[in-house]
Amino acid sequence: MNEGRDISSLLAIMARLRAPDGCPWDRQQTFESIAPYTIEEAYEVADAIERGDMQGLKDELGDLLFQTVYHARMAQEAGAFAFADVVESICTKMVSRHPHVFGDASIASAETQTVAWDEYKARERAARPGGDTRKGILDEVPLNLPALSRAAKLQGRAAKAGFDWPEIAPVFAKLREEISELEHEIAIAADQARIQDELGDLLFAAVNIARHLKIDPEAALRGANRKFERRFAYIENRLALSGKSLSSSILAELDALWDEAKRNEAGKNPV
């Protein structure tokens, strides 16, 4: 491994980019303009992990770290805080939230630590200047999370407060109810807003099933997307070998090739 550089090198590069004679693009950026890149880099880290790409993960973690350095530099220029303050903040938080590691507390399991973690966070909020300003237990779920992830977070927070079914059977019943309501709105030719509303309820119910099964709905849908891409590419390749195209093929032929792709995958990797 290359031990030649540490975080100070990256901080120096960032300072140079933001200098008056630095990069014009970097100098004109703001927290708001950089935030979408920060989110994108986090997803690219997750993608590298899912693909088992360690070289890619190394590069993507670097990109994500650069985003932290970027925001910290802009905050320093604004006189708000510096990178060292970010490091101090997270170190203090991690020590405070792990008294069973850095203190004398005792935590028996990961589940117990999850409960304790929420309690630590609640105490930290109450200790902030002005105290805990939340209006409800769902207030801290970020608005800009992907919709599936946010739905799971909202449901999880509500479940911790006791608003949840104790078993999965009623969740499936709710899913079937939402399907029926969507079908009804479509059958009566309801306006698009009502159909969209019912579709949203159906997706929300599907997320609830994922949560009860302890499956990340975002990861599940990403897997389904990859599966669809593989099978669609198989159809394209098979048609190309026959001198055909998608537009010149009938649906029955495409369905047959789709089933063929499924059988081939099942023989190699059951999905």
Image (cartoon, helix red, strand yellow):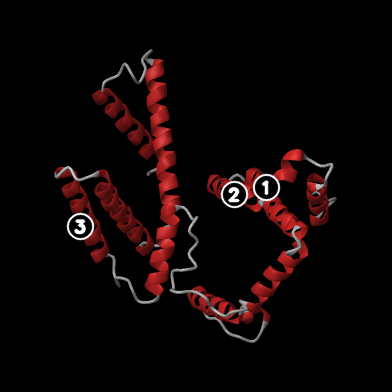
Residue drawn where x is 23% and y is 55% of the image: 178
- Label 1 close to label 2 by CB (< 8 Å): yes
Closer to us: 71 or 97: 71
User: Residue 37: where, in percent of width, then height?
Assistant: 61, 46
Residue 125 in which image quadrant: bottom right
Q: CA distance from mark 1 to mark 2?
A: 9 Å
Q: Residue furthest bottom?
A: 104
- The residue identified by callout 1 is 63
Q: Give the mark nearer the N terminus: 3 vs 2.
A: 2
Q: Give the mark nearer the N terminus: 1 vs 2.
A: 2
Residue drawn where x is 36% and y is 15% of the image: 244
- Label 3 close to label 2 by CB (< 8 Å): no
User: Residue 133: where, in percent of width, then height?
Assistant: 52, 76
Q: CA distance from mark 3 to mark 1?
A: 44 Å
Q: Residues within 10 Å of mark 2 (few under 14, many from 20)?
A: many
Closer to us: 31 or 177: 31
User: Residue 122: where, in percent of width, then height?
Assistant: 53, 78
**For this view, does 6 lie left or right of residue 106?**
right
Q: Residue furthest top?
A: 243
- The residue identified by callout 2 is 45
Q: Give the mark nearer the N terminus: 3 vs 1.
A: 1
Q: Is label 1 in a helix, a strand or a loop? A: helix
Which numbered tag is attached to residue 170? none
**Residue type beneath disc 2:** Val
Q: Is label 2 in a helix, a strand or a loop? A: helix
- The residue identified by callout 3 is 177
Q: Disc 1 or disc 2, which is closer to the eye? A: 1
Residue 192 in which image quadrant: top left
